Amino acid sequence: MATVIEKVKPAYKSRVLDRMTGLGRDIVKHKVSYAFLAPYALIFITFTVIPVVISIYLSFTYYNILEPPKFQGLQNYIKLFLGDDIFLLAVKNTFVLAAITGPIGYLASLMFAWFINELPPKVRAFLILIFYAPSISGNVYMIWTVMFSGDTYGYMNSTLMKLGIIYEPIQWLTDPKYMLTVIMIVVLWMSLGTGFLAFVAGLQSIDRSQYEAGIVDGIRNRWQELWYITLPNMKPMLMFGAVMSITSSFAISDVTIALAGMPSVDYAAHTVVNHLIDYGSTRFEMGYASAIATVLFVTMIGCNKIVQNLLRKVGR
Amino acid sequence: MKKKFRRIRTRRLNRSLGGDIFNIVIITIFGIFMVLPLIYAIMQAFKPLDEIYMFPPRFYVVNPTLDNFTDLFLLMAQSWVPFTRYIFNTLFITAAGTLGHVVIASMAAFVLEKHKFPGSKAFFTMVVTSLMFSGAVTAIPNYLTMARLGFLDSYLALIIPAFGYSLGLFLMKQFMVTIPDSLLESARMDGAGEFRTFWKIAMPCVKPGWLTLIIFCFQSLWGQTGSTFIYSEELKTLPYALNQILLGGFARAGAGAAAILLIMIVPIVLFMATESSVIQTMATSGIKE
């Protein structure tokens, strides 16, 4: 017995030693790899990783930039959820916007990519450009302020009046009844973005022979083909598209500022990011704004995880 | 006979005529919805002022004119900072940011995909996670960091963070899968150093990849107003200057429409030129579990 232990012990010891020097040796051995990674890693860590940590830390403090941050526990969160009606309104608006534009934008991207994929290559390239253009063309959404302008010169008002549907101009962008709807239309118009391109590319790269094999297995129409062959094959793209659309639908803010102003009338189009901008760059309450940022961070990551779990079920 | 045979072969499986018609109708309706505002933006830019303020408003332009563009340039010529300076600022920020991003992100992508070293998986997981939240989350600490580093009120505030865009690294890393390992191996056998292998062998293989990174980085920098970080008028960007014109109201509606068109057309033209490369890159964009 004793001899066995004696035999094992030095072997174990040397393995630990090996691993320790191994780690040091690893860094030397892989110094080229680390050197290649270093410039990107430095910037990525400085401007993305550390800020998340700082943001979480600041959310527990009172900080107005002039004085050093003062730790105050959960105070910001308590105020946020119990004392800030406008924040709760912003949360509601953000969830309404995200719950409607996120899934619809996502499914529309998928559906249009699928429809476009059936067409000949030249037409396909042209349609991809048309559908993708709104999401890349800078601040062209400003054109919607002209279309939905509240006076009779607005294209929407004058058309509806000419058709006799309404008799006086509707204040599309200042009447809380319509603001969110108009913003949703504009956001949806811009929602065929990176995810849409990923779907188009994913559809094109599926092997034809799988469809032929599907026929043998009894697949009869394009819907069965979509569910049993196409979607399972492009699952990684579905994941990517979901990440893109969740992230962007929770971050809606530029469009609401451009269309409804900041702050919007009765805060009817106020989103969480708007609220963050308000406290961060107008009131300089950095601790409070960081609490908003942290809530946003947790929500976005949480939603992404939930949706990824749902997407695992595709094609089963 | 041969022709007929080919037609049967190319007839796609599982497709009904009714379905095809439905497909085309839907695509046409929504295609029109997508493109109308863009066409409207173009029409507005070429309308003389009396057509912009016509009642009832008319969608198309009857007497197209370039007045709006000359107005825009006149207006800009009168401004305190010469218009060309705004153009230079945006071009410089966009070009420097994009170039740095493509080189640095490609280097990182190369080792993350082709080398095995401790920590590479963990790092890539962080990058993928960072796709799941938007820039708003990190905006405040970033502002503080830039203040510390002395980046405020300089081009650096927009250029340096662009180097670290995570979408670019992600897409490039996924696309590097398409480089055959044997190709890199033979370059190393021939005595090429690792950087040479990367620059001379790997990079030419992933041309569609870096074209895609250029497009995406360009898009995000091109539209930057940068007003949170840059205060000196002579360092401000083109979108910022054009936004100021848009705020000018009635009298400047024509120049404003011309400004919208100018900003919108550049990314669209660039995307047109690189569309097939972008699609090729996106084919490897999936997130695998």
Image: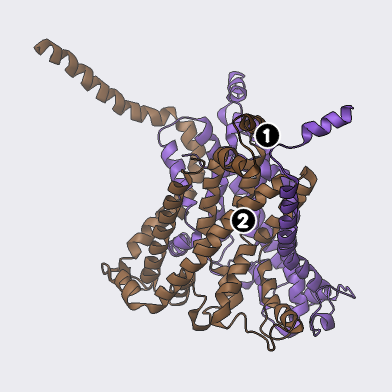
Task: Indicate the position of residue A233 as horizontal and vertical percent values.
Answer: 57, 37
Local secondary structure at mark 1: helix
Taking the spot 65% from the left edge, 54% from the top edge, the residue there is B218
Q: Is residue A57 left or right of residue B75?
A: left
> Which residue is at the front of the view, B44 or A187?
A187
Is residue A92 placed above or below A225 in the rendered structure? below
Q: From the top left corner, tell me how far across and down residue A145 is, in percent.
A: 67, 76
Q: Amino acid at mark 1?
A: Pro
| Residue B165 makes an appearance in the image | no
Chain under disc 1 = B
Residue at position x 90%, y 27% in the image: B1
Q: Residue at x 34, y 26 (%)?
A: A22
Tag of residue A3: none
Q: Where does label 1 land, which residue?
A: B204
Amino acid bearing label 2: Ala
Give the side of residue A238 with respect to residue A20, left or right.
right
User: Which picture quadrant has residue A212?
Assistant: top right
Picture colour for chain A: brown
The shade of chain B is: purple
Which dot marks residue A108? 2
Q: Nearer the viewer, residue B85 or B36?
A: B36
Image mark 2: chain: A
Residue B118: x and y, percent? Answer: 40, 33
Taking the image as drawn, is residue A298 in sight? Answer: yes
> How is this picture coloured?
by chain
Q: Residues within 10 Å of mark 2 (few under 14, many from 20)?
A: some
Describe the element under mark 2 as helix, strand or loop: helix
Mark whose residue sits in front, 2 or 1: 2
Q: Position of residue A179 (x, y in %)?
A: 57, 77
List the single residue furthest toward the left. Answer: A2
